[in-house]
Image: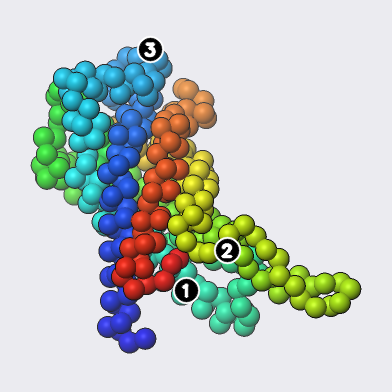
Amino acid sequence: MDNKTKTEKIVKEWLSAGIGCAVADTIFNPLEVLKVRRQVLIQTASAVGISENHAQSSSSIEIARRAVREADGNLFRALWQPGLLATWMRGLSYTGFRIGLYGTVRERYESLYRDLFERGSDRGQDQLMIKLLAGATTGAIGSAVFNPIDIVRIRMQSQAYLEPRYPTTVSAFRTIARDEGVVRGLWRGVGVCMARASLLSGSQLGTYDFAKRYLLVVPREDDEDKTTTKKKKKFMFFTEDGPILHFTCAFISGVVAQTVTQPVDTLKTLAMSINSSNSKGLGAIQLASKVIRERGFLALYRGFWPAAARQGPVMVVQMPIVEQLRKLCGLDYF
């Protein structure tokens, strides 16, 4: 494959994943808004300007009701609009990169594995580790490069409707860069963001990819009939690599990924939501220590249910769309 063909393939992979992710994220943006606002509430009163009792008592339903009241009953402005443009930008950039380029990176790792160990990666544990590593790689790189978009998205989703600090998405980039600095502001929390993206992408894409191959009807060459010494086929659950299999594997991977990443996801939200000019230099480790010391480890799972309610369905919608867009672009399924 020449360089032009490789570049065209990468562009198609990125574009198909980015569009699919942007569509899915738009549908489930209200759940992301609720998750972010619920996570932010575990900060201290001095950090977010609310009382401790209010933070403890606010449920996702109460947060949603308050948002709708502030928006004069307009459900779209209350829950869909916050951070929506930044969400589209994030889907087309970061998410499109980490999902779209996963297949290319996985193939590269498989090739390196074969060269290093002079054998195929057909063993189950080897396959899974390669898939997890490929997903972790695209997640970490994508989050590092596109961190400013995530900063703006979280700030837009967490700010008060009646007194917004950032009137528009574009002004948010300018304000953060001016008041907090380009690196210190727009790349704030990049370490915890990369850790979260690495865990999310590795567990999500690795689980999805591995589940597809496990649940599809496949011949097991190492499964021999002990009486006839003939190799036989071991049948799984699906006979076709199509939408039903994609839905099933997407749901499994979404639940697994959210469970694995929720604590780091909470820390990422806290680190990015705080204005760095008045955060007293708290980094991810300090934030984690503070939250665990004051609220216990389970506080890091604050917002888990809206997050899980979003992640499972988002993957169920997202991955089948991405798979079909890949086909339309002339690419193979994952």
Query: Of discs 1 and 3, which sits in the foreground?
Result: 1
Q: CA distance from mark 2 to mark 1?
A: 24 Å
Residue at the (67%, 63%) spot, across then down: 235
Which amino acid type is marked by label 2? Thr
Amino acid bearing label 3? Asn
Residue 30 percent across, percent down from the top left: 30, 34
The outermost residue toward the front is 239
Pick the front one: 143 or 75 = 75
Q: Which residue is mark 1?
A: 107
Q: Where is 289 relative to 86, above or below?
A: above
Q: Give the distance between the C-alpha atoms of the residues marked 3 and 2, in whole angstroms.
A: 54 Å
Location of residue 63 with respect to 95 vertically, above or below: above
Q: Position of residue 326 (x, y in %)?
A: 35, 66
> Outermost residue toward the top?
53
Asked which quadrant contains residue 77, the reply is: top left
Q: Dot 2 lies on which element? A: loop
| Callout 1: SS | helix
Residue drawn at x 29%, y 58% as measured from the top left: 18
Question: The C terminus lies in which quarter of the figure?
Answer: bottom left
Across and down, in percent, residue 141 comes to 36, 60
Q: Are marks 3 and 2 in contact (CB under 8 Å)?
A: no
Which label is found at residue 239? 2
